[in-house]
Amino acid sequence: MKLKYLLVLFTLALCFAFSLILESKLVAILIIWAGFLVFIRFSGHLFFHAKTEEEDHTLLFFKNIFVIAFLIRITACVILYHSPIRQIGPYFFAPDSYYYAKKGWVIAQLWLGNIDQFTYDAMISSWGRNIYFKFHALCYYVVGEKIELLPASFNCLAGAILPIISYFNVREFGVSKKCARWVATLICFWPSLILWSCIGIRDIWSILAFNTLLLGLIKFTKTRNKSWIILMGLCLLLIFAIRAYLLPLTLIALFASFFISNSKNIPLTFFLSLVAIVLINQLDARFGISAYLEPSNVEFLRGAYSRHGSGFQVNADLSSPLGYIKLISVSLVYYLFAPFPWAFGSKLSMFAMPETLSFYVLFYFIIKGIRLQIQVNIKAVLPLLLLVTVISCSYALVEANVGTLYRHKAQVVTMLLLFGPIGFYYRKIPLRKKS
């Protein structure tokens, strides 16, 4: 055992030495990440002590799934950013990754003293000053040059953590460890989750925040341990920093689920209702969420999103509540199931088709898994279902572009995929006997 730890330390020292002497900072970054993976794989017991043989097997699974997930994502990251085929790169799949890199480098230039404040103000608008641009800038500032793979590699790290969070979430639903491992494996290899976590965009961080937030809420509901409130607060802060417009929607879903779960505790429910009303009202005043529901704004947003092709329901009739219901219903079908197999509109839709067809097959088991959990453990899954519903309806209402919907769908697909293996695992048992 001691020999193994000595080999790990020797490998880390070797990686660090190579990173210092190599002229290529890109290669040095990859070597440091390789050393990190070796450390995680072979030295996890330094931080986590398994009390039983079963816990030891679970810990080994966590280390293996993390290393595999990270290796897949960092490999895809290197291919996308340094492939000779420039037509299929990160800008092809996510054009805004170009702006994160470009504006992040401008901010880094200011920090490095290469440009003055006047030049910086002329080059960067207020839109380019949110936290994720500064995250890119920090990465470039540390290495002293624009290496786009560096911030993307941290996205790979977030994507590698996601399968483990998903494992803990479904374990809180009461399913077996074997079924939870199926869930973690599915999340590890799901194509769009790999793609969005190996490009320098912010999507994977909001996905990770949502899933960790759900875990904290379920744990707090069961244990009433205040430490989970701190975790939930950090997740909400990350959601606010990454996608501020999703914070009011997230709070609505969380408060609603908490009220329903604690409806018998009238004083607590009444107090939290007042807090929710005040908080959501303040957030609405700050971000103007309710203004987006006005017909003119919905039409403007849908028109803006449909300018680059693949548009649908651009001129929907919103003169009545029935028009809103019809629009959301049609858009939800696009949100969950597009791009459709019979509509090859772009290269991106061709890349997405294998995953789309897989989701069609899995959707039956997702519905079956949701039915099972509603029957046997509705309090645990209620926050997740409400959050999926609120986010899905919001995106479906304002976005009219298939490509944009496909990318934003990953934020809810990750949560829906939790139920697929559950429905498949318990497929042969009658629903009434599964409890």
Image (cartoon, rainbow, N blue to C red):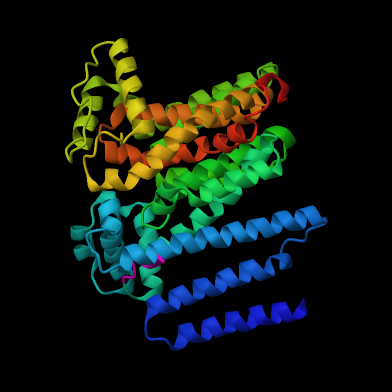
- Picture quadrant of residue 257: top right
x, y percent for residue 171: 67, 40
Which quadrant does the N terminus fall into? bottom right
Who is closer to the viewer here, 38 or 389? 38
Q: Is 114 rendered above or below residue 326?
A: below
Identify the residue at horizontal 76%, vertical 58% (top origin): 56
In the drawing, does residue 232 fall left or right of residue 293?
right
Residue 105 included in the magenta stretch of the image: no
x, y percent for residue 362: 49, 35
In the drawing, does residue 199 fall left or right of residue 160?
left
Magenta stretch? Answer: 146-151
Residue most toward the right?
A: 52
Residue 150 included in the magenta stretch of the image: yes
- Picture quadrant of residue 143: bottom left
The mark total stands at 0
Q: Is 272 rendered above or below residue 161?
A: above
Report whether residue 213 is seen.
yes
Who is closer to the viewer here, 29 or 249? 29
Residue most toward the front?
A: 428
In the drawing, does residue 54 fall left or right of residue 91?
right
x, y percent for residue 212: 57, 44
